[in-house]
Amino acid sequence: MALVTVVRDNLLSGANLQKLEVGAQVSVSGDVAMRWAAAGLVEIISDDDKTLKVATPGDDAAEQQDESATKSKKAK
């Protein structure tokens, strides 16, 4: 996702073609930001390639979760 600032008043965005005001900051995908910047419609403030990282617990973490679940059931 990239954060951009609108610099032209003829930029329409979204499924309903909503007009974006000059000076508005919008978060869009990196590809869209690059196309809009090439057309001179926006200035890119930040272009962060955010990726989703999934952590999977190892055997030790799974055992600890099982032990804590057992202890919480006994406490009830």
Image (spheres, rainbow, N blue to C red):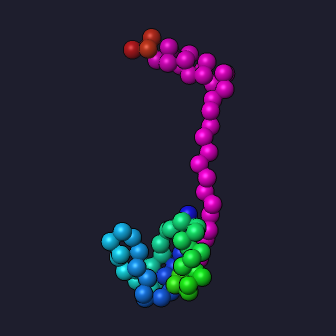
Residue 1 visible in this rendered orientation of the protein: yes
Residue occupying image coordinates x 40% and y 79%:
12
Looking at this view, is 24 or 36 the one in front? 36
Residue occupying image coordinates x 58% and y 67%:
30
Residue 12: in magenta span: no
Residue that protrudes farthest toward the left in the picture:
16
Tell me where residue 53 appears, x and y as whole percent. 62, 45
Question: Where on the picture, by quarter, is residue 19?
Answer: bottom left
| Quadrant showing the C terminus | top left
Looking at this view, is 41 or 67 the one in front? 41
Tell me where residue 32 appears, x and y as whole percent. 54, 71
Residue that protrudes farthest toward the top in the picture:
74
Q: Which residues are magenta?
A: 43-72
| Quadrant showing the N terminus | bottom right
Tell me where residue 16 appears, x and y as whole percent. 32, 71
Residue 70: in magenta span: yes
Q: Does 12 sit above or below residue 69?
A: below
Residue occupying image coordinates x 59% and y 48%:
52
